[in-house]
Structure formats: structure tokens, C-alpha cells
Amino acid sequence: MLGPARLGARGSRVAALLMVLTLLAGCQTKSAIEQGPHTGSTTAAVTAGVQEVVITTDEDYRFTPSTITVHRGKVRITLKHVGTGAPHDWSLQDFPADYVPLVSAGQTKSVEFTAPEPGAYKFVCTIHIKQGQTGTLIVLPN
């Protein structure tokens, strides 16, 4: 077996480069699907006193739009699965009652709730958090 002294300068550089590449590959913990961007933002439209937002999802494990702005008051979130993949849900973290149950491909379901205090809140697909399926609900004061 050749030791470092027998490899020469070029062999040592190649060995060091291979070691760095191996370490970098080991640090890559996200799949390609998790690296897709979160896109879109919207402000809820008011219909009959209720702020309404439709969010779509599909096999890319993303919500569109991923940033939603509302004011304090009644909010209706409608989750529409426009893809062909796994089912998804929608949950406002730390507010377990603010939840849209699983929707399969082609389905649409809604939840109605009162927006919390002004601030930024995270929403997620509870079964695809590790895939990065998250978004932000921004609540503005009235």
C-alpha cells in the first residue's frame, strides 16, 4: 500500500480533493425536491366578511402561494390539490384547530378560523415538513 510520502504532491492533492468532495456529499441532507423555491404571495380577498385564500399544492411539496397576508378577523383557507402525488394537509403551527384535513389529488377542503394576534406564523403540511412544505401567514393589525 502506498503511503502519503509515496503519492507525491499531485497524489496528495487528489487525495485531499476526494476527501473534501466526500465530506461535502455527506453534508448534503436535503433532497432535490426540498431545494425548490417557495413562491408566491397574496393578500386575502374579503367575501361576505370572511378573508379568503386558496392555496394549491401538488407533488412538488410546496404551497402556492407560500406567503399569505391577512388582517385580524375571520379567515377561510382552502387547500386545493392540483397534482397527482401524495395527499397533503394544512396546519397553522401552534394553533391545532386551524387545520385543513388531508386532501388527495383533485380534492379541495377548507378551514375557517379567527386570525391570531398580529405577527408572522408558520404553516405546514404536517406529513411533509421534512420535505420543506411550509409557508408563512402574516397577520396585520386592523
Image (tube, rainbow, N blue to C red):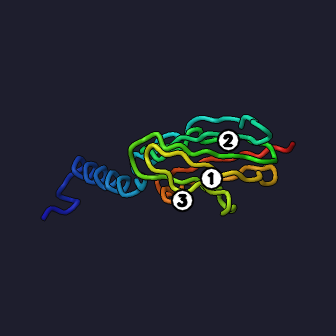
Q: Quadrant of residue 94?
A: bottom right
Q: Check disc 2 and give the amino acid type.
A: Ile
Q: Check disc 1 and give the amino acid type.
A: Phe
Mark 1: which secondary structure?
strand
| Residue that label 2 marks | 68
User: Few, some or many C-alpha atoms within 10 Å of disc 2 (few <14, some 14-19, many ≥20)?
Assistant: many
- Residue 76 as seen in the image, left or right of residue 80: right
- Residue 83 as seen in the image, left or right of residue 92: left
User: Few, some or many C-alpha atoms within 10 Å of disc 3 (few <14, some 14-19, many ≥20)?
Assistant: some
Alpha carbon of mark 1 to alpha carbon of mark 3: how far? Answer: 9 Å
| Residue that label 1 marks | 123
Q: Seen from this angle, which residue lies furthest left?
A: 1
Which is more toward the observer, 68 or 34? 68
Percent position (x, y) of residue 11? 21, 50
Residue at coordinates 42% horizontally, 56% vertically from top-left? 29
Q: Is the C-beta separation of discs 1 and 2 under 8 Å?
A: yes
Res 31 label: none
Alpha carbon of mark 1 to alpha carbon of mark 2: how far? Answer: 10 Å
| Residue that label 3 marks | 126
User: Few, some or many C-alpha atoms within 10 Å of disc 1 (few <14, some 14-19, many ≥20)?
Assistant: many
Residue at coordinates 31% horizontally, 55% vertically from top-left? 22
